[in-house]
Amino acid sequence: MSITHSQYDVIILGAGASGLLCAITAAKKGRQVLLLERSNKVGKKILMSGGGRCNFTNQFVDADNFISQNKHFSKAALKRYTQWDFIGLVEHHNIEIEQRRHNQLFCQNSAKDILNMLLAECDQADVDIKTHCEVEHINAFDIKGHSDKHQHHDDRQRYQVQFTNDKTSQKLNCQSLVIATGALSIPSLGGSGLGYDIAQQFGLTLTPRQAGLVPFMFSDDMKPVCERLSGLALEVTVSCNKQSFTENMLFTHRGLSGPVMLQISNYWQAGDAIDIDLLPNLDAAHWLLESKQQHPKNQLKTILAHQLAKPLVTELQTRWWPEQAQSPLAELSDKQLIAIGHKLNQWSLKPSATEGYRTAEVTLGGIDTDGISSKTMEAKQQPGLFFIGEVLDVTGHLGGFNFQWAWSSGYSAGLFV
């Protein structure tokens, strides 16, 4: 698909999830659409997501699954294009899907199925796609007499996009310009701050940004513990700043990862502690006191090995009861066992940092939604300029919610460009 026109109704910057769905929606309405992608191929994040299987949505989607300074902003788009709408598209293309824990939906075969579906829809709707495009400048034409809302019958060219492609500079005009450039997460897949720069060029404000859905690192005595336990996974409950999640935790050479750590990272700030319940379905103190009565000759590590992996128990023993390592339970006081039980249910750790944007699945924060129409995704004070997907201050929990936001916001904008 190459450029065949000198000007377009709609130019979309970024051929990721939101950009592709927006292009399909707009083109099906008869708009002439061009997608400009800076990397060598489209949909890179789609391909790598979900371990190559793409967790493309969730069966249960609610505004509460999203983080934003305006918690109501996402509601209109999520209602206009629901998870069932996207599931219907997937089923129409006969893509085999599987449901996993927490109602997450994945491709049964490969994430390529989702990307190929979107590209087939683009092809059918005559969307032009151009890769290897570096945007150099956006220019807005000074149009007199337009209303403060974008009008479909107003066919005047509003924006000029200057970009390089194969070292050749080009300029193209359009009526509507859509920013679907993603954010700062995983720069190796094309993440950048371009969308923020464009927003600021046109007077939109930004909320504070940080890496989200990202593993934790440690610089204290927990670092060698994590290194020794690297590869070990177990289900825990993790809490921070009045938020809790129960999922798998994974020890890595750098620190702690796994779904539960990615989830809680969205609520963690530098300097905060995280509380880990290693036995989320058990009152550990009560259980240890019962075990003392029932198995007084057993060592504590023997009892704990019924619930936790032996390497982890060994590390905890070194930290919490080294002097009593060889003692039977009968020789440990009730007070000692209660204290250890409380630590098992509330192991407080202080990460030194997260792994940052390099491995973050999303960027928290972004373009302040106060300046964006929740119905159309259009900038309120800049007719014809739209922002969709991750560049906005809307971040989903782990579990297919960020893709659903991409589909929903992309579709909403596609109706109005």
Image (cartoon, grey):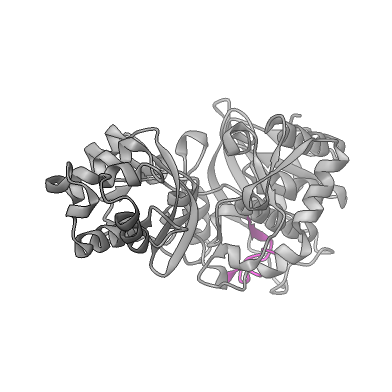
Examine the rendered structure and indicate whether residue 46 appears above or below residue 197. Answer: above
Q: Position of residue 384 (x, y in %)?
A: 69, 61
180 left or right, relative to 349? right
Residue pushed farthest left? 323
- Residue depicted at x 69% and y 74%: 148
Please identify the dominant SS of the magenta region. loop
Viewer-closest of 284 and 333: 333
Q: Quadrant of the N terminus?
A: top right
Residue 11 appears in the picture as rendered? yes
Q: Quadrant of the C terminus?
A: bottom right
- Residue depicted at x 41% and y 70%: 242
Q: Quadrant of residue 269?
A: bottom left
Instruction: Tell whether position 375 is magenta.
Output: yes
State which region is magenta. Answer: 371-388
Examine the rendered structure and indicate whether residue 191 appears above or below residue 236. Answer: above
Instruction: Tell whether position 322 is magenta.
Output: no
- Residue depicted at x 26% and y 63%: 338
354 left or right, relative to 70? left
- Residue depicted at x 75% and y 66%: 79
Q: Position of residue 143 (x, y in %)?
A: 68, 65
Q: Position of residue 256 (x, y in %)?
A: 36, 44
Residue pushed farthest top? 166
Q: Position of residue 98 (x, y in %)?
A: 73, 40
